[in-house]
């Protein structure tokens, strides 16, 4: 899996997030399930084929830890962000999204609806 660097251009953080680029069905299904945890500064970027509310929904089944979920549209703008609790059945964005950044809960306050993000190869 390739890694990308995600920067919030609207609300710059001290350091960008290094995320795995997850664009296959199996990778998206597995997500972060069964992993023991997630280090600060890291995450997983789930990539859907198109913008959608339904396709961008996530589940937290078999998760051992809570995450910050950030939904991003085709224009790389944040359309929603939620603290996703382990074992919750489903979280859906309030607007269509193509990308879902799953990262450490530490970053929840760093993302607001409308923030412009930038993705670069690591």
Image (tube, rainbow, N blue to C red):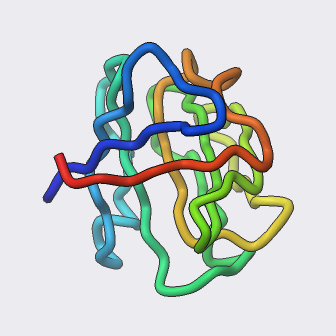
Identity of the residue furthest to the front in this view? 9
> In the image, 65: left or right of 60?
left
> In the image, 39: left or right of 8?
left
- Residue 10 at what x, y percent from top left? 65, 36
- Residue 23 at what x, y percent from top left? 32, 72
Residue at the spot 85% in from the left edge and 60% down from the top edge: 94
Residue at the spot 33% in from the left edge and 30% down from the top edge: 42
Identity of the residue furthest to the right in this view? 94
> Looking at the rendering, which quadrant does residue 46 occupy?
bottom left
> In the image, 83: left or right of 27?
right
- Residue 62 at what x, y percent from top left? 46, 43
Position above or below: 106 against 12: above
Identity of the residue furthest to the bottom in this view? 50
> Looking at the rendering, which quadrant does residue 26 occupy?
bottom left
> Looking at the rendering, which quadrant does residue 32 occupy?
top left
Residue 88 or residue 118, whichever sits in front: 118
């Amino acid at each position: 899996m390739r890694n990308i660097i995600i920067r919030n251009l609207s609300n710059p953080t001290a350091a960008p997030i290094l995320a795995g680029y997850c664009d296959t069905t199996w990778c998206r299904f597995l997500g972060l399930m069964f992993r023991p945890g997630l280090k600060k500064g890291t995450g997983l970027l789930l990539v859907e084929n198109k913008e959608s509310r339904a396709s961008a929904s996530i589940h937290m089944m078999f998760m051992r830890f809570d995450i910050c979920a950030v939904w991003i549209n085709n224009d790389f703008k944040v359309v929603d962000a939620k603290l996703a609790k382990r074992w919750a059945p489903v979280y859906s964005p309030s607007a269509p999204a193509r990308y879902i950044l799953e990262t450490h809960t530490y970053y929840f306050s760093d993302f607001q609806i409308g923030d412009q993000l930038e993705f670069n190869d690591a």
